[in-house]
Image (tube, coloured by chain):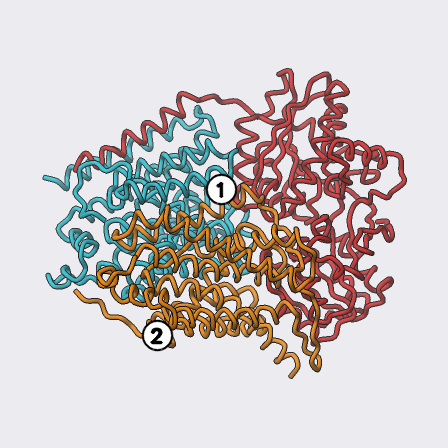
Amino acid sequence: MNKRFSVLLPVMAGVTLLLAACSQSGSPGAAGVADTIKIGEFASLTGKEAAFGQSSHKGTLLAIEELNAAGGVLGKRIDFIYEDNRSSPGESATIAKKLITRDRVVALLGEVASGRSLEAAPIAQSSQVPMISPSSTNPKVTETGDYIFRVCFTDPFQGQLLSGFARQTLKAQKIAIFADVSAPYSMGLAQYFREPFVAGGGQVVAEQKYTGGDKDFKAQLTAIKAQNPDAIMVPGYYTDVGLIVAQARQLGIKVPMFGGDGWEAPELIQIAGTALEDTYYSTHFSPENSDPVVQKFVAAYKAKFNGETPDAMAALGYDSAMVLADAIRRAGTTDGPKLRDAIAATKGYAGVTGATTLDAQRNASKPAVIITVKDGKFKYLETVAP
Amino acid sequence: MTEFLQQLVNGLSLGAIYALIALGYTMVYGVLRFINFAHSDVFMVGAFAGYYIGRQLPPETLGGGLVALVGGMLACALLGVVIEKLAYRPLRGRSTLTVLITAIGVSLLLQNLGQRVFGANPRSFPQLFPSHEFHFDGMVISSAQLAVFIVTLLLLFALRWIVMSTRIGTAMRALSFNPTAASLVGINNDFVISCTFALGSALAGAGGILYALNYPSIDPLMGTLPGLKAFVAAVLGGIGNIPGAAAGGLLLGLIETVVVALGGSTYRDAVAFGVLILILLLRPGGLLGRLQTEKV
Amino acid sequence: MRLPQAQGWLLLALVASAVLSWFTPSFNPYFLDVAMSCGINITLAVSLNLINGYTGQFSLGHAGFMAVGAYTAAMLTTAASSWLLPMLGGQTGLLFLVALVAGGLVAALAGMLVGVPSLRLKGDYLAIVTLGFGEIIRVILQNIDAVGGPRGLIGIPDYTNLFATFALVSVTVYAIWAMIHSTYGRGFIAVADDEIAAEAMGINSTRYKIRAFVVGAFYAGVAGGVYAHFKSYIAPQGFGFDKSIEIVVMVILGGMGNMPGVIIAAVLLTILSETLRQFGDFRMILYSLLIIVLMIARPQGLFRLRRNQAGR
């Protein structure tokens, strides 16, 4: 009987001896004196939102490659360490901790989904490691602290522009909103759309919810159809949106449907196909933009990734890494507080997603593009300035 | 009124899919007295089999659809037999707990192998049968939903015929009453068990393809929730009871749709479990089943 | 003289935890993390072992109890802290303790709610119903907007340290071990071995089963609270079937009803899952193969020492 209990002590001792044997202390970012610069990334390379994570990751990869090919930053090669959070909650926090304390990265890149950025941000903030999110649009992300930045626009802006688009271009007075209750991005965007839309005289005739990962939306769509909206807003992610649009058309819903940048993925067309006629979404980037900076990026991306055309996530992933590198150069060091100040001072950086200036809230104020689907392809419709 | 009828159609078509999967559960349980946890993942494999076969065929043809359906069912039947032979047969005679845990292990293995082999990203399922919407008076039934009704009905009758009117069916029933006695009268238990698994898995495969037709986004984890709900449906109707599984499935589909229509869409997954707990508390034998007392 | 000795061990373990915790600043933070994860998982596995192993009730919803405890404790240290903390004289340590115990108690209540209906059920049905309960808890939490719903709860203060986790392990192991090895405790094992015979001998199997659920749930709840203040972020999706299975595997690997085995298994699996982190899918494939192989070849678990279990 003592034996039973006495197993416990050796186990505890063993575990902590392991700690002692590997004990090293030191502040993160001390790697600045090493001969490489370690940059960490956490992304959803597998799982539900893998398309985003993969795109963003590829963009970042391309940027790092180009930087290293040009001799690195501050004369040092970039050591790029990335990990997959499997689109799963809880993982990003652990990965952030690991990247910061074990791998000692000087900065973190990530994530696409606001929910997962929100997980990791407090850790980066308390460790004084700058974090740049490529495309999380929920305002709360940068509100976490002064070490957290993003290179994209935020949902209040996106919601506002969608509300204008709905009223002016779609000429819709009565809207139904169908949001994903499991994603902060979706609920946030719905809210930031609803407020200006109603303030501008519009009416929200129906509001339904779904949980990300659901497959059957017919019950909610039937209820929406009964309210006769002029258009339906679906501020969700492409995996669900594809099915939603397809099922809506099957139920005989013919009105336009639109949403935000969560729609953007080639899989959307694969899932919903012809059902996507008369649908629209806002995003950060269009490969059809004739700006030479954009075209150079598109060409390089195609060359590296088998002729694939980059999407907004890839472009933002690319920009996030480039903005970071630019800040490191300006700061002349990878020291946390100084690097943070340099990133905050980013002004007019010529990114592939547009001129990037970080404001006092550490958000980027950028124009958005509206994309529509025609003949089974994404097509650029218009640009909306902030 | 139209909205109500539409929701009715939605509920029944969802329910028919649950019924199809529930049939597989109930068959295996009826003969072997154990819950094949891996059934939901055979369902998933069926959907993927349909996906790969369907991509080789011209889309939207009746013939093509049937080929994919039958092909998927055969693939799953094979898978079911293999699983039984490798994972369950060595455990014949052991406690049900051990077998249950193994079944969970097989289920997890299939899911994770699926993620490794197929990738975790959802894929879009090809349009197998000609797609068309039938409009009645404001109500819409899609051809995919129609396919579910038709195939489920056909398979239901086929199953009943096999179990009631064929030798192998009689052997299955004998086995479900008393395995020892069955082997004594000359039934090859191993063979019959393999057939049961093959049949149940084929049904799961059909369920997978029909599900994928209606919700054309498939991924390796797609089976878990429908599988659990179908299990609840089987219990609801009386586990081991074939018409019960069908009835249970339809009922569950309707209940779930009603809950969603009333605004409780975020609770839809809990509905099935709520129903399960209720039925086990109030009428453990299920709606159409008989409770068996345990002899000491 | 058994009892005094066992209490002696408990005291020793608590002191050792405190001493080790003193040296925290000199440990590498990442490995510290892993050690604390081990501690939490040991507690979870040992508490499940009481239900599954010693009492033979196959529960697949243990993560639900963990979730209840985690959320309760987290709410007390975040939303309720403004009025609770002053009541406790501003002592965050005390707040943490109160939160943990509260979490455990609410989880114990949940354990009772789960245990009562499950009584009549055996084997497969029990497993599915407990799974169902676990999922219902998850869905309910997902729908409570006040705790963040599906987006989860962020900003939980990280009160968890080495002492907290190891102290918890010590207390849990002591409590459950002492309970089982008392005369009263033999009842649990009797219920597991043969319920009908136990009833015939005058053991109220119902009461034992409920007790197993309640106590097991309590410790799972406390472990959940410690977990919440460790990750600083909890979401309902993290407490689903997958988590329950993780804990079940630890109990199976260690051998159901085999406490030292379960402890070792918990540590091993925690470390394994960290080292295999980069091979994400392989880890789960390995787990599932492990389960199958174990059940076929060695259902009594890897680490069975001397204890005689009727072959289960």
Where in the figure is residue A293, as x and y percent of width and height? 86, 34
Q: Which residue is more in the foreground, A214 or B206?
A: B206
Residue under numbered circle 1: C231
Parent chain of label 2: B
Indicate which disc residue C169 carries.
none
Mark 2–mark 1 distance (CA, rounded to whole Å): 47 Å
Q: Chain of mark 1?
A: C
Callout 2 crowding tier (Cα within 10 Å): few <14, some 14–19, many ≥20: many
> What residue does disc 2 label?
B289
Residue at x 81%, y 52% (from the top left corner): A371
| Secondary structure type for disc 2 | loop
The mark tally for this picture is 2
Q: Residues within 10 Å of mark 1 (few under 14, many from 20)?
A: many
Q: Quadrant of residue B13?
A: bottom right
Viewer-nearest residue: B290 or A98: B290
Q: Are marks 2 and 1 on the same chain?
A: no
Chain in red in the render: A
Q: Are marks 2 and 1 in contact (CB under 8 Å)?
A: no
- The local secondary structure at tag 1 comes to helix
**Which residue occupies 86% across, 50% down?**
A383
Chain appearing in cyan on the rendered image? C
The amino acid type of the residue labelled 2 equals Gly
Residue pictured at 30% horizontal, 47% vertical: B90
Determine whether, in the image, residue C50 is placed left or right of residue A82.
left
Where's residue B295, x and y in %? 19, 67
Letter of the chain in orange: B
Q: Is residue C86 visible?
A: no
Q: Position of residue A45 (x, y in %)?
A: 61, 40
